[in-house]
Amino acid sequence: MDDLLTMTPQGLYCARGGFHVDPWAPVPRAVLTHAHADHAREGSAAYLCAAPGLPIARQRLPRTVIEAWQYGERHTMGEVQLSFHPAGHVLGSAQLRIEAGGEVWVVSGDYKRALDPTCAPFEPLRCDVFLTEATFGLPVFRWDPTAAVLEDLLGWWEANREAGRASLLFCHVLGKSQRLVAELGLRTERRLFAHGAIAGMCDVYRDAGVKLLPVDRVAETAKGKDFAGELVLAPITARGTTWMRRFGDAAVALVSGFMRVRGERRRRSVDRGFALSDHADWPALLQTIRETAARRVLVTHGYAVPLAHHLRDSGLDAEALETPYGRDQEEMVTGEEAR
Ligand SMILES: [Zn+2]
Ligand SMILES: [Zn+2]
């Protein structure tokens, strides 16, 4: 039997269903796993996504036709049955389950197994062929419990407060910053400040029913406000811009899974790194792949080649796929987002 998904110049294509998955060039029908820039690109004629992600997709892909289905709803598309299932990555992120002729393929999209108060938890699915991401597909990537990272972060903020400095936290606009706002809201009563791009995405989450404490837009604070002692969430693209000047001699930190690697903090010249990620770490990748019971695994993103290699060594039929997904995933913030 033919493969349910094949690689085309526009991206992964399901001929029997008549759609592309997260295409990187315009196509007639795009099915999206989530709205991060490397997965949701403009220009296709029609889009389909999971319902909780619709407000984000609408913001990211204005002036386009976007249809949405609830998680778990099965629909017939051409000759296949298609459904979305929670991936636990960001609000509305989905795994795609594609079934035809008794065979099941699952595309993970980006995913994590750690609980996140801002989105539905990852749903383990069984399948014959599993397409997994491998953003952190190396044994060095192992996450500490979220609570431990948050405790570190609060300690850092407190030390900066005592030193009379602002704490500037660089994080991804979509997903990571909302998760931080939600997690910090469980642990502190203090107000949080944010760059407009992040505050705007918090509004989208709040409108979608996610509980998030208010964040103050830096641009809307009184002229000459002293940010000493405050915590400010900012996209990495704000770095080196005039927007940064108002914070004076601020302590700067980056929240990213890459902070797990020795030397990365220095290379990215930040004072502190917090290894909190919206992607599965190495043990979670292996656990998830095992749970699918897939006989064949196709791997995308950053460390696709080493993960596929490891899986082959463990006796699985595995292969890395060349895609543009995840190019500097955690830090890539488009100009549009930095507005
Ligand atoms: Zn993503
Ligand atoms: Zn991705």
Image (tube, grey):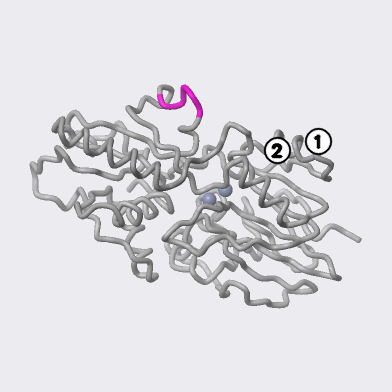
**Above or below — where is 267 with respect to 154?**
above
**Above or below — where is 225 with respect to 264?**
below
Res. 105 image quadrant: bottom right
Label 1's element? Answer: helix
Q: Which residues are magenta?
A: 261-265
Identify the main secondary structure in magenta. Answer: loop
Apparent side of residue 334 relative to residue 240 in the rendered image (left or right): right
**Along the line of sight, the residue nearer the viewer: 241 or 25:** 241
**Along the line of sight, the residue nearer the viewer: 182 or 232:** 182
Pointer 1 residue: 313
- What amino acid is labelled 2 in the image? Leu
Apparent side of residue 250 relative to residue 140 in the rendered image (left or right): left
Cβ of mark 1 under 8 A from ligand 2: no
Rendered residue at 66%/52% (across/down): 288
42 within the magenta span: no
User: Which mark is drawn over residue 307?
Assistant: 2
> Which residue of the protein is positioned furthest toward the right in this rendering?
1
Task: Tell me the crowding category of disc 1: few under 14, some 14 to 19, or many 20 or more residues within 10 angstroms, Cα based.
Answer: few
